[in-house]
């Protein structure tokens, strides 16, 4: 799980630290981030999204090359398949680190952008991963420190020198043979900067046989890469999730092979238990299935009681909030199973009482780590103090991430209503708007119209 995030020259943050630990530097399981619009809540989630997506850029690039080769042959038949076309779009979007980074560097700064992630694995192995980017959104330094032989040490450091040459240090306690270090060095010279070392190594691992990897490289590196690969992130623009293999990868609709029909049955049962607990009018949850050759196409339906009649309602006709409930369910299942998940605007369209009920039910069963942003102030009545964070902004635009426990004891009296205090500005992190004279604005519009 993660213990700290430090961002420099990222989005609207010149430098900010997000401490994700409780006592004895142990990571927290549940973290809720509050703040006014534009404060940078979504940027925190996006920073973890960048880490997750950066792991697979070489893989996406290879897939994109395959698609492009088909296009050159004017073979567009595969693109007629909706799933394959979706994979093509994804590969194109995330095929190198520049495309993932986009316009995330702080406007107006000439200094490098840096993302620093600290983490703890297996309850005792500390690690830190640092990515540094120049003005071209190219990686200029990458460093991984992790517990080696019971002490934290440098696994590798790769950086560009003043001559723009790629220089690397690979720890011989991890990269055991000269042969594998040479193999990696060749790939680094070709690919690093556009892709991270982790992505380059992961692609190499897929390419080479398992016995070679196990013989030449200590397992500690694979522990870290496996951890990063299993992060689940939901932002406003993309979702990447580590899904249970026994469940459908897409809950609302899709297709599976006939041999995987049990996935449909199991997912159906889970969704019924979930939605029937949240809505009194939902009497059943099921999939309508059509078998075509060796494929089963499925579509989700809710059986609802409407004015005394049972009606089968296609899930795509449901409300935004109900769709959001389906979107976040895989994340909840993930954190119960020990996964690490980040969700932007978790309560998007969901009634605040329903959202509180969900988190109350979930909180006792979290074995992993759930980090989310929200505007739902009702949660402040239920969330543990240590789980609540506020992004504060002063009049000069300086920002901090503060935990609810950082405020003095008078403010945090047990008798105080944290929701009311937050709305009154006791914990900052709320808008401080001035009055808007809409009549004056309307007059400005009319003056322009008459002057034309």
Image: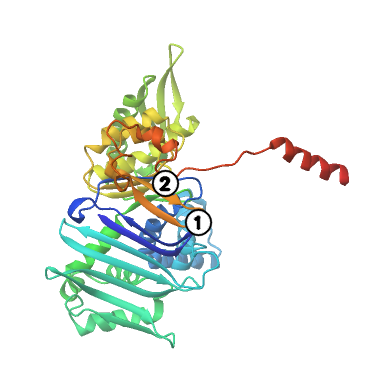
Residue 60: percent from left, percent from top: 42, 63
Residue linked to disc 1: 397
Residue linked to disc 2: 344
Residue at far front of view:
410
Quadrant of the rendered structure where residue 114 is? bottom left
Residue 74: percent from left, percent from top: 56, 64
Picture residue at 28% right of the left edge, 62% below the top: 118
Tell me: residue 58, above or below residue 411: below
Residue 322 visible in the current orientation: yes
Sort mark 2 into few (<14), some (14-19) or many (20+) by Cα contacts within 10 Å: many
Tell me: residue 316, above or below residue 214: above
Q: Seen in the image, is 409 located left or right of residue 174?
A: right
Picture residue at 27% right of the left edge, 69% below the top: 205
Tell me: residue 223, above or below residue 254: below
Quadrant of the rendered structure where residue 157 is? bottom left
Q: Seen in the image, is 57 located left or right of residue 228?
A: right
Secondary structure under tag 2 reads loop
Which residue occupies the foreground of this view, 378 or 92?
A: 378
For marks 1 and 2, give the one nearer the viewer.
Answer: 1
Residue 269: percent from left, percent from top: 28, 31
Quadrant of the rendered structure where residue 155 is? bottom left
Q: Seen in the image, is 20 located left or right of residue 442?
A: left
Which residue occupies the foreground of this view, 162 or 166?
A: 162
Picture residue at 43% right of the left edge, 50% below the top: 392
């Amino acid at each position: 799980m993660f213990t700290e995030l430090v961002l420099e020259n990222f989005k609207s943050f010149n430098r900010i630290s997000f401490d994700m630990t409780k006592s004895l530097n142990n990571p927290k399981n549940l973290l809720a981030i509050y703040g006014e619009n534009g404060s940078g809540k979504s940027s925190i989630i996006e920073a973890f999204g960048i880490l997750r997506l950066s792991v697979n850029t070489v893989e996406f690039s290879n897939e994109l090359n395959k698609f492009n080769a088909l296009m050159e042959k004017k073979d567009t038949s595969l693109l007629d398949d909706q799933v394959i076309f979706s994979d093509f779009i994804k590969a194109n979007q995330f095929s190198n680190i520049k495309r993932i980074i986009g316009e995330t560097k702080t406007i107006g700064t000439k200094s490098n952008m840096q993302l620093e992630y600290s983490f703890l694995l297996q309850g005792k192995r500390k690690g830190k991963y640092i990515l540094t980017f120049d003005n071209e959104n190219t990686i200029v330094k990458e460093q991984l420190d992790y517990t080696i032989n019971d002490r934290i040490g440098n696994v590798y450091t790769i950086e560009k020198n003043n001559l723009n040459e790629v220089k690397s240090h690979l720890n011989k306690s991890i990269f055991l043979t000269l042969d594998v270090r040479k193999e990696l060095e060749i790939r680094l010279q070709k690919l690093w900067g556009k892709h991270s070392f982790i992505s380059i190594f992961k692609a190499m691992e897929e390419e080479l046989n398992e016995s070679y990897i196990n013989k030449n490289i200590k397992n500690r590196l694979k522990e870290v890469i496996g951890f990063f690969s299993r992060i689940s992130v939901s932002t406003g623009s993309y979702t990447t999730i580590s899904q249970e293999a026994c469940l459908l990868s897409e809950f609302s609709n899709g297709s599976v092979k006939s041999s995987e029909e049990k996935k449909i049955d199991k997912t159906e049962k889970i969704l019924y238990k979930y939605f029937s607990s949240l809505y009194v009018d939902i009497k059943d949850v099921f999939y309508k299935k059509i078998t075509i050759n060796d494929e089963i196409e499925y579509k989700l339906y809710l059986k609802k009681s409407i004015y005394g009649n049972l009606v089968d309602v296609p899930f795509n006709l449901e409300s935004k909030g109900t769709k959001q409930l389906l979107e976040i369910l895989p994340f909840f299942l993930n954190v119960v199973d020990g996964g690490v998940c980040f969700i932007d605007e978790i309560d998007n369209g969901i009634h605040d009482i329903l959202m509180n009920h969900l988190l109350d039910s979930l909180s006792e069963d979290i074995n992993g780590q759930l980090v989310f942003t929200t505007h739902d102030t009702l949660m402040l009545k239920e969330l543990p103090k240590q789980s609540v964070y506020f992004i504060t902004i002063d009049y000069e635009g300086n920002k901090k991430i503060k935990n609810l426990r950082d405020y003095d004891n008078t403010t945090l009296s047990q008798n105080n209503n944290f929701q009311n205090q937050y709305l009154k500005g006791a914990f900052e992190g709320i808008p401080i708007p001035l009055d808007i004279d809409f009549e004056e604005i309307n007059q400005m519009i009319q003056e322009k119209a008459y002057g034309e």
